[in-house]
Image (spheres, rainbow, N blue to C red):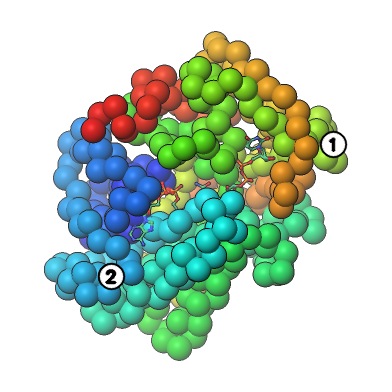
């Protein structure tokens, strides 16, 4: 298939480009490089030996977007492009809603204008708010008032907008993929997560402590109702996640209408289990201190991944050891991320 990938220079997007190319698909990337570097796509080529067509375009620039859509005939779009920093979204709600919601509407409009009506959307487990029961199945409630920040609400708003688009025009096929906690990096150590400034998420922070860039990890609370008191999450290797997208575009080719899948492993790990796993994989100490809970955090969150398994034939194959070893290979080979290369 000929696939348009928005946000393809980013963390999950660049890993997905590799899996698409290796599965024999062709790829065109749109990215405004606001949170990424072209170096990631150079490395995609280094890993696969295949080219990606790249357009430096912002989804808010409608004429430029239309030009890209008119430049080729695509079979499906995978839509990663979004701003994703939870704290920043609280400070800058207009920017976040505009980028994530308006950006998606612009994309859908440009797609509809050329008759392209197959889209995979990067949603998030954050849409479930505080889980009523675990593991989370796709039919669990997604109450917007329980989603604690504009970033999360932008994901839920886009889910609803896409469902409404399908209601208005049944030719659309839409896969809403709710990711749990993506971590890890490609086995080559050439691409990985490259956060700008202090990382907000656990695993990049742990990696930066292990490599000596940061002194110690702050663990946000050890008084949750979990086995060791620290938060439990469903960490999923980014390469497994990327493979889920290849399955999703294949599913869209069967014209399923709107489909929703959790992409997780079904296994929860605590913060302290992740720290221990990382120490074992890296051979480095990860000093930490326990501090107060972070506002908006929940105790536990993990997926029931059965629906993706039965419907898509997809399941996560890589475990905690791979997640930690691969994060460490990327971090230790690229202590300053893509910066040192550019
Ligand atoms: P990322 O920031 O690495 O990638 C997003 C890419 O989109 C970046 O390359 C950025 O430059 C680009 N972009 C942003 N706004 C754009 C715009 N208006 N026009 C063009 N390009 C734009 O993030 P990621 O971790 O790879 O996340 C990819 C998607 O998955 C996002 O939609 C994110 O919300 C979602 N998601 C991520 C996580 C996670 O923990 N990483 C969890 C759940 C969902
Ligand atoms: N944590 C720490 N210290 C840190 C960072 C995180 O103790 O420095 C803890 C958190 O309290 C939580 C766990 O590690 O218990 C995971 O936190 P992350 O910030 O890595 O991930 P979240 O589950 O909070 O959220 C992430 C993304 C969201 C996304 C969600 C579900 O940031 O955007 O996963 O996919 F919606």
Q: Which element is circle 2 on?
A: loop
Residue at disc 2, CB closer than 8 Å to ligand 1 = no
The structure residue drawn at horizontal position 46% and vertical position 64%, both measured from the top left corner, is 95
- Residue that lies at the very extreme toward the left in this rendered image: 71
**Image-based side of 47 in relation to 157, left or right:** left
User: Nearer the N terminus, badge 2 or badge 1?
Assistant: 2
Task: Assign ligand 2 to one image quadrant.
Answer: top right
The structure residue drawn at horizontal position 63% and vertical position 56%, both measured from the top left corner, is 126
Alpha-carbon span between mark 2 and mark 1: 46 Å
Q: Position of residue 216 (x, y in %)?
A: 62, 22
The label shown at residue 50 is none
Q: Which element is circle 1 on?
A: loop
Does residue 259 appear anywhere in the picture?
A: no
Of marks 2 and 1, the one in the foreground: 2
Quarter of the view holding residue 193 = top left
- Which residue does the numbered mark 2 point to in the structure image? 61
The structure residue drawn at horizontal position 45% and vertical position 82%, both measured from the top left corner, is 165
The structure residue drawn at horizontal position 59% and vertical position 51%, both measured from the top left corner, is 87
Asked if residue 284 is positioned above or below residue 100 in the image, the reply reads above
Q: On the rendered image, what quadrant is the N terminus found in?
A: bottom left
**Image-based side of 263 in relation to 238, left or right:** right
Q: Position of residue 159 (x, y in %)?
A: 53, 70
Around disc 1, counting alpha carbons within 10 Å, would you say few (fewer than 14), some (14 to 19), or many (20 or more)? some
Does residue 75 appear anywhere in the picture?
A: yes
- Residue that lies at the very extreme toward the top in this rendered image: 283
> Considering depth in this image, is 187 or 89 the residue closer to the camera?
89
- Residue that lies at the very extreme toward the bottom in this rendered image: 168
Q: Position of residue 157 (x, y in %)?
A: 55, 72
- Which residue does the numbered mark 1 point to in the structure image? 223
């Amino acid at each position: 298939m000929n696939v348009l990938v928005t946000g393809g220079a980013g963390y999950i997007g660049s890993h997905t480009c590799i899996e698409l190319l290796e599965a024999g698909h062709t790829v065109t990337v749109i990215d405004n490089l606001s949170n990424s570097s072209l170096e990631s796509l150079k490395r995609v080529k280094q890993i696969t030996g295949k080219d990606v067509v790249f357009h430096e375009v912002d989804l808010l620039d409608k004429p430029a977007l239309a030009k890209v859509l008119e430049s080729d005939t695509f079979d499906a779009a995978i839509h990663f492009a979004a701003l994703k920093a939870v704290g920043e979204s609280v400070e800058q709600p207009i920017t976040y809603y505009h980028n994530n919601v308006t950006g998606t509407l612009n994309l859908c409009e440009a797609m509809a204008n050329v008759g392209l009506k197959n889209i995979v959307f990067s949603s998030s487990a954050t849409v479930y708010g505080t889980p009523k029961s675990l593991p989370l199945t796709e039919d669990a409630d997604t109450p917007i008032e329980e989603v604690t920040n504009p970033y999360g609400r932008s994901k839920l708003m886009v889910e609803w907008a896409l469902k409404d688009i399908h209601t208005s025009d049944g030719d659309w096929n839409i896969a809403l993929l709710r990711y749990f906690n993506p971590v890890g990096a490609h086995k080559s150590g050439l691409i990985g997560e490259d956060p700008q400034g202090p990382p907000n998420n656990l695993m990049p922070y742990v990696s930066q402590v292990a490599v000596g860039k940061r002194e110690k990890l702050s663990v946000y609370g050890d008084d949750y109702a979990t086995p060791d008191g620290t938060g439990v999450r469903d960490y999923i290797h980014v390469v497994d996640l990327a493979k889920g997208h290849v399955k999703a575009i294949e599913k869209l080719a069967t014209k399923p209408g709107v489909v929703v899948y959790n992409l997780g492993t079904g296994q929860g790990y605590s913060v302290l289990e992740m720290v221990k796993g990382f120490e074992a994989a890296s051979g480095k100490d990860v000093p930490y201190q326990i501090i107060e809970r972070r506002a908006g955090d929940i105790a536990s969150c993990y997926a029931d991944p059965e629906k993706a398994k039965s419907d898509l034939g997809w399941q996560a194959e890589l475990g905690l050891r791979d997640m930690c070893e691969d994060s460490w290979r990327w971090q230790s080979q690229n202590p300053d991320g893509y910066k040192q290369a550019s």
